[in-house]
Image (cartoon, helix red, strand yellow):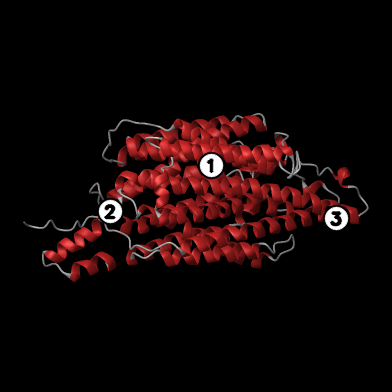
């Protein structure tokens, strides 16, 4: 019997390099929109919250609500991607995002804004999950590192460049903060048009079974946990009956969710995936990276504007070292991985840089020299850029085509969960630390803290007397250092997790993970020999 030749194409749908780039253009636009929605408000939040008469909790929840909605819906989008048309789904996600963005721009209160941000998060969850799934469908793991570099670069620009765009919008009188929500709409509409013209994938027609109970329980457990983290120490003590009720309730809901998922025909987060060591360790690392990716971008804006007294636009410009670090790491490392097929060393190096960067950022104060801060931010950017996309790549390399959606969405789910927990927890730490530092600083001036107006509203340092302004700037600077120091252990957890991942060289096609071994054995039996095996690893 004649042995079938090993496949030479890099894609399962027979797309050329040009076709892949054309299809990716729409996906990259969509992904940029999703990331931008979560970060563009960062530098605008002080202005937004002040105008809508909100406090520190509202500041945190404007960001957390989107991350939570993204987290909760990512597995649903991922499961749907395994069951129906991926093209229709990504277009639907864009439509939901546009609706949420328009409504958010029309908000008249912080409550309305948070609700509309939830709708935005639902759409963003679809874009985040489906971009990874569609790439995995089109491109083989070995070639995916090259294209993931493009996606990582776009995510980098959206993650850290969003605050810069938001700052420029807020500082432009004829625009105003509402355009922070409108700015993504043209990109989303353009992405819809481009995807309609360029994305052509085979449609999988199967009966759709959505695990609504599992999705509801998972969302409820995470929401209750985040509400507890946000309010504890402010509305009630950390050790109190409210804490006991919320923590025990979240644990019970989580346990019930696990029970439901084990029994569901089409679970949102298939428990069997966690029998795979690579997936389990990648999930642990993804949570840690999520804390870093979102925590850094959200609270750096507050630090620059309050502690250093700069404008929203300049605040965004001052984060450029982190943007450059992300861009360099995402693009360069992606190409290296494609050329070598090896990825673990970059996960280890990235996690180490993330840990070191956070630890150094823990020394942050209001008067820290900017050149030193730039080095710290660049280290964090390099660390996130080397780990974020490559964790997904490592997971996709271990599963078959039929589980790409579920596996990819699991990593995205826990990365978003890490971001939501990170923003809530770090925001709570910042609030408590700043309050204590302000009280101590004002006491040194002989002023009672209650008379300073520091009870929850964000200060406008430019309107304060010089002595009080110095106290406020110092408090927020020291508080920012504390939250980055609190984030450093998460980087260490990521480093430990990726160190135990077993490296499997990236496959040349999008089929079953064991297919390479079968193809190599078949080629050797047909006389192709070691030359073909060598080509499959090094070319």
- Mark closest to the chain's N terminus, 1 or 3: 1
Q: Any mark on residue 441, and which?
A: 3
Q: Callout 1 environment at 10 Å: few (<14), some (14 to 19), or many (20+)?
A: many
Name the side, left or right, on which 203 lies relative to 46.
left
Distance in Å between CA atoms under marks 2 and 1: 30 Å
- Mark closest to the chain's N terminus, 3 or 2: 2
**Quadrant of the image containing the N terminus:** bottom left
Q: Callout 3 environment at 10 Å: few (<14), some (14 to 19), or many (20+)?
A: many
Q: Any mark on residue 257, and which?
A: none
The part of the image, by quadrant, that contains residue 38 is top right
> Which residue matches tag 2?
17
Q: Position of residue 521 (x, y in %)?
A: 18, 63
The local secondary structure at tag 1 comes to: helix
Q: Position of residue 513 (x, y in %)?
A: 29, 55
Which residue shows up at 74% across the image and 59% down it? 366
- Mark closest to the chain's N terminus, 2 or 1: 2
Name the side, left or right, on which 175 lies relative to 461.
left
């Amino acid at each position: 019997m004649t042995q079938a030749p090993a496949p030479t194409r890099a894609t399962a749908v027979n797309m050329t390099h040009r076709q892949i780039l054309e299809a990716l253009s729409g996906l990259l636009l969509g992904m940029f929109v999703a990331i931008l929605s979560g970060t563009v408000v960062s530098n605008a939040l002080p202005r937004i919250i002040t105008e809508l008469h909100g406090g520190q909790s509202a500041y945190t929840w404007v960001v957390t609500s989107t991350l939570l909605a993204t987290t909760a819906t990512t597995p649903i989008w991922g499961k749907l991607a395994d069951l129906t048309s991926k093209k229709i789904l990504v277009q639907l996600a864009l439509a939901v995002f546009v609706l949420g963005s328009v409504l958010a721009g029309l908000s008249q209160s912080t409550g309305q804004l948070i609700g509309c941000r939830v709708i935005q998060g639902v759409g963003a969850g679809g874009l985040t999950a489906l971009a990874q799934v569609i790439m995995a469908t089109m491109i083989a793991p070995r070639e995916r590192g090259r294209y993931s570099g493009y996606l990582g670069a776009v995510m980098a620009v959206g993650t850290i460049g969003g605050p810069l765009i938001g700052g420029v919008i807020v500082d432009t009188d004829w625009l105003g903060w509402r355009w922070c929500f409108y700015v993504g709409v043209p990109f989303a509409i353009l992405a819809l048009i481009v995807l309609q013209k360029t994305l052509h994938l085979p449609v999988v027609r199967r009966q759709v079974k959505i695990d609504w109970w599992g999705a509801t329980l998972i969302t409820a457990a995470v929401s209750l946990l985040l509400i507890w983290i946000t309010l504890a120490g402010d509305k009630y003590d950390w050790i109190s009956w409210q804490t006991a009720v919320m923590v025990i309730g979240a644990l019970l809901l989580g346990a019930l969710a696990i029970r439901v998922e084990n029994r569901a025909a089409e679970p949102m987060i298939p428990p069997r995936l966690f029998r795979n060591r690579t997936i389990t360790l990648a999930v642990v690392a993804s949570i840690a990276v999520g804390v870093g990716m979102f925590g850094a971008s959200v609270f750096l804006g507050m630090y620059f504007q309050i502690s250093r007294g700069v404008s929203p636009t300049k605040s965004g410009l001052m984060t450029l070292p982190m943007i450059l670090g992300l861009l360099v790491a995402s693009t360069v490392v992606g190409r290296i991985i494609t050329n070598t097929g090896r990825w673990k060393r970059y996960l280890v190096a990235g996690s180490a840089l993330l840990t070191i960067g956070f630890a150094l950022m823990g020394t942050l104060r209001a008067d820290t020299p900017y050149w030193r801060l730039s080095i710290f931010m660049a280290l964090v950017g390099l660390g996130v850029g080397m780990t974020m996309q490559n964790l997904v790549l490592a997971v996709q390399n271990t599963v078959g085509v039929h589980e790409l959606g579920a596996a990819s969405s699991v990593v995205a789910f826990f990365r978003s969960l890490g971001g939501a927990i990170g923003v809530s927890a770090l925001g709570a730490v910042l609030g408590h630390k700043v309050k204590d530092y302000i009280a101590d600083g004002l006491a040194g001036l002989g002023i009672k803290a209650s008379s300073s107006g520091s009870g929850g509203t964000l200060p406008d340092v430019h309107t304060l007397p010089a002595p009080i302004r110095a106290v406020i700037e110092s408090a927020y600077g020291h508080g920012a250092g504390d939250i980055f120091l609190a984030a450093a252990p998460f980087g260490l957890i990521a480093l430990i997790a990726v160190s135990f991942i077993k490296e499997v060289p990236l496959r040349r096609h999008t089929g079953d993970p064991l297919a390479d071994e079968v193809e190599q054995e078949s080629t050797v039996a047909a006389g192709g020999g070691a030359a073909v095996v060598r080509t499959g690893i090094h070319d």
